[in-house]
Each structure stands twice: as C-alpha cells, then as structure tokens.
Image (cartoon, rainbow, N blue to C red):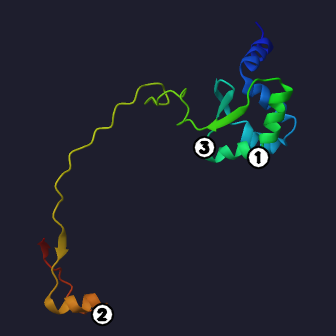
Amino acid sequence: MSLTSSTTAATSLNPWNRILSALEKKINRHSYDTWLKPTRFSHASGDVLFIRVPTAEFRHIADKYADLISEAIDNLALEFSDVQFITAEEDPNTPPPVNVRHDGALLQPVRTLPTLPRAPLLRRRLPLGLRSRVSTGTRHRSSTRSTPLEIL
C-alpha cells in the first residue's frame, strides 16, 4: 500500500479532512493555518459532526466560516446537518491524561514534605535612643561596636 492510497483512505474515513481540503481552496493561507488547520475530527453522532478545537476561543469558527463549511458539506454530499466545535475537555474521545515524562517513563506522584517549624527570627537590639532615629531615618554617629543579637 502506498502513502498516497493510505492518505486517501484516511481522508475518505474522516469527513472533516474532506471539508478542510475544500475550505483550504477558498480561505487565505494565513486564516486557514491559524483557525482551521489546528482543528481535529472528534466523532460523528447521527447527522452532527463533532470537531475538536484547541481552545474555547476557536469556537468562533462556527460563526465566521459557517457558510463555507455548509457549502463544503453540500458539495461533498456529506450527510451532516450540523457541526459542533468542542474542546478536548468536552470531547468524550479524549483519553485521560497520563503522567509520562518526555522520555516515556511514568512520573511518580508528588510527595509533600512535612512542614518544619520555623527558625526564630534574629533581630538586632538597638539602644533605646537609636530606635527612634532608625525609624525616622536620621543617622547616629555612635561607636562602631556591634550590638548584641536578640532571639525573638
């Protein structure tokens, strides 16, 4: 089986790819690449086609391109009367997230460490006269000896 025949088979099974092929010819390249190319076929239920979009902001595709999508459905003789755009969270076919690292190994659940008691704060004990000067920002020319530390 050649690559083109497998691609053609996948396209015929996926009605959204057929619709995208028709839309690609009618929409400018930038708009197509921005709004339509990131969409994916999710599933079909009756006459409703469900298309997965990356984010909820992409749902405006339904308003902006509704006429062109309907035209493509009619021209391709597809049996869909409605197209619904859904996010991955709303898609019943989206598998649950798996905790896998980039190298394929499973991630271990994150363990929380016990909370350790906080160390006491150290604060310099200033002579009574300096406390008011420090708080007001005035300088004091006292001796250069260090002041003892007080544990709170």
Distance, label 2 to label 1, CA atoms, is 67 Å
From the viewer's perspective, tell me whether residue 93 is left or right of residue 49: left
From the viewer's perspective, tell me whether residue 70 is left or right of residue 62: right
Q: Position of residue 95 (x, y in %)?
A: 50, 27
Q: Is residue 21 visible?
A: no
Residue 26 vs residue 80, the one in the foreground = 80
Q: Identify the residue at horizontal 85%, vertical 43% (top origin).
A: 28
- Which one is earlier in the sequence, the residue at label 2 or at label 1? 1
Q: Identify the residue at horizontal 76%, vertical 23% (top origin).
A: 79
Q: Do the residues bearing badges 3 and 2 touch, measured as CB atoms within 8 Å?
A: no
Q: Position of residue 17 (x, y in %)?
A: 75, 26
From the viewer's perspective, tell me whether residue 107 is left or right of residue 14: left
Badge 3: few (under 14), some or many (20 or more) residues near its Cα, within 10 Å? few
Q: Which residue is mark 3?
A: 55
Q: Amino acid at mark 3?
A: Thr
Q: Which residue is mark 1?
A: 64
Residue 138: image tag: 2
- Which one is earlier in the sequence, the residue at label 3 or at label 2? 3
Q: Position of residue 87 (x, y in %)?
A: 58, 38
Q: Identify the residue at horizontal 71%, vertical 33% (top origin).
A: 82
Q: Quadrant of residue 59?
A: top right
Q: How many marks?
A: 3
Q: Identify the residue at horizontal 56%, vertical 35% (top origin).
A: 88
Q: Amino acid at mark 1?
A: Lys
